[in-house]
Image (tube, rainbow, N blue to C red):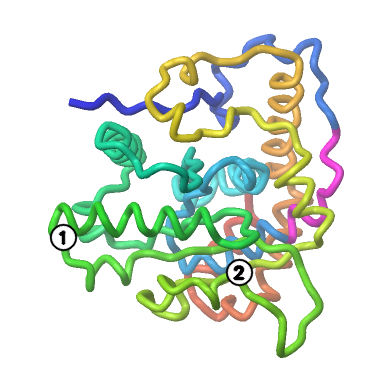
């Protein structure tokens, strides 16, 4: 039996593990708070009342802010981090496929579970060309086929939400999902985007120090990733992440999130109106 493996990350909501770890690490201030709150509001509003799985590391800060904001709402258990990074090089070996599937199963993602879950699962990530989503979709599709689960049922449970860098709108604007052939196998509303300021997108994707290593295929089975890192760069990233959770808990940010969500077209849906009221009440 293959043992699941995933990078260690502290629980930033309960924080029992932190102790005095950050005593000498005040952390760097997050430079795009307004953009982060706006992005988080749109992610929630476009999640279709599903479970959000943040793929990779790029959108960790969106997850952390929402972890604080939703901590006392009915959606507190809807947020998940999904360590995953994959670039097509050589075909995956049998042992790698087996390890990846074990890792996903530990996150609650299996063909059997997808076919029987009530809510949708919403994969969320920063998107440039859509390669990560393409590979993830293909790996899931192969697994579903191997397990002989019903694709026509599962396709209604999958959603992909890409966070993209905003561009000028025109008839010729390129959109990542339009040239991805696999998106046609899902309902049209199952693939959507949230556009953000390019400088904010670049900070999250290219510049921001991260708490965990990129979980590439060479690390999927490496137990070294399960050991917490305590170098200065990691602790600085940890301090920033903790600060974002606390920011999300604040009345100001919860009220701001509620205000922005109320401006979204999906606010007509009862689940979103209920969640917005919970955010305001705290």
- The answer to whether 27 appears left or right of 234 in the picture is right
**From this viewpoint, which residue is outermost toward the bottom?**
171
Residue 165 spot, x, y in % from top left: 74, 63
Magenta highlight: main SS: helix
- The answer to whether 63 appears left or right of 105 in the picture is right
Residue sitting at x 31%, y 47%:
109
Residue 155 spot, x, y in % from top left: 31, 69
Residue 8 vs residue 273, the one in the foreground: 8
Mark 2 touches mark 1? (CB < 8 Å): no
Q: Which residues are magenta?
A: 29-38
What whole-number distance in Å separates the C-alpha atoms at marks 2 and 1?
A: 28 Å
Residue 82 spot, x, y in % from top left: 47, 42
Residue sitting at x 34%, y 38%:
100
In the rendered structure, which disc, 2 or 1, sits on the residue that comes first in sequence?
A: 1
Quadrant for the N terminus in the image = top left
Q: Residue 149 got which mark? A: 1
Residue sitting at x 46%, y 19%:
226
Helix, strand or loop under label 2: strand
In the image, residue 261 above or below residue 198: below
In the image, residue 104 above or below residue 51: above
Near mark 2 (Cα within 10 A), the count class, few <14, some 14-19 or many ≥20, is many
- Residue 30 belongs to the span the image colors magenta: yes
- Residue 156 belongs to the span the image colors magenta: no
Near mark 1 (Cα within 10 A), the count class, few <14, some 14-19 or many ≥20, is some
**Residue carrying label 2:** 193
Helix, strand or loop under label 1: loop
**From this viewpoint, which residue is outermost toward the left?**
148
């Amino acid at each position: 039996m293959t043992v699941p493996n995933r990078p260690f990350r502290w629980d930033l909501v309960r924080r029992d593990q932190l102790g005095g770890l950050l005593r000498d690490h005040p952390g760097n201030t997050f430079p795009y708070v307004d953009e982060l709150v706006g992005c988080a509001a749109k992610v929630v509003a476009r999640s279709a009342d599903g479970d959000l799985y943040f793929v990779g590391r790029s959108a960790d800060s969106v997850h952390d802010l929402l972890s604080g904001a939703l901590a006392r709402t009915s959606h507190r258990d809807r947020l998940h981090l999904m360590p995953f990074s994959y670039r097509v090089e050589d075909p995956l070996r049998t042992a790698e496929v087996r390890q990846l599937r074990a890792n996903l199963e530990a996150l609650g993602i299996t063909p059997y579970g997808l076919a029987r879950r009530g809510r949708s699962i919403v994969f969320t990530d920063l998107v440039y060309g859509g390669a990560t989503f393409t590979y993830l979709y293909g790996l899931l599709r192969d697994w579903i086929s191997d397990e002989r689960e019903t694709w026509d049922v599962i396709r209604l449970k999958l959603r992909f939400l890409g966070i993209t860098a905003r561009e000028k709108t025109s008839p010729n604007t390129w959109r990542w999902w339009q040239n991805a052939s696999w998106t046609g196998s899902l309902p049209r509303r199952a693939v959507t985007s949230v556009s953000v300021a390019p400088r904010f997108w670049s900070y999250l994707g290219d510049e921001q120090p991260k708490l965990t290593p990129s979980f590439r295929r060479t690390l999927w089975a490496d137990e070294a990733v399960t050991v917490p890192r305590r170098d200065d760069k990691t602790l600085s990233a940890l301090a920033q992440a903790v600060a974002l959770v606390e920011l999300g808990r604040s009345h100001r940010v919860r009220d701001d999130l509620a205000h922005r969500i109320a401006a979204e077209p999906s606010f007509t849906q009862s689940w979103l109106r209920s969640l917005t009221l919970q955010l305001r009440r705290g």
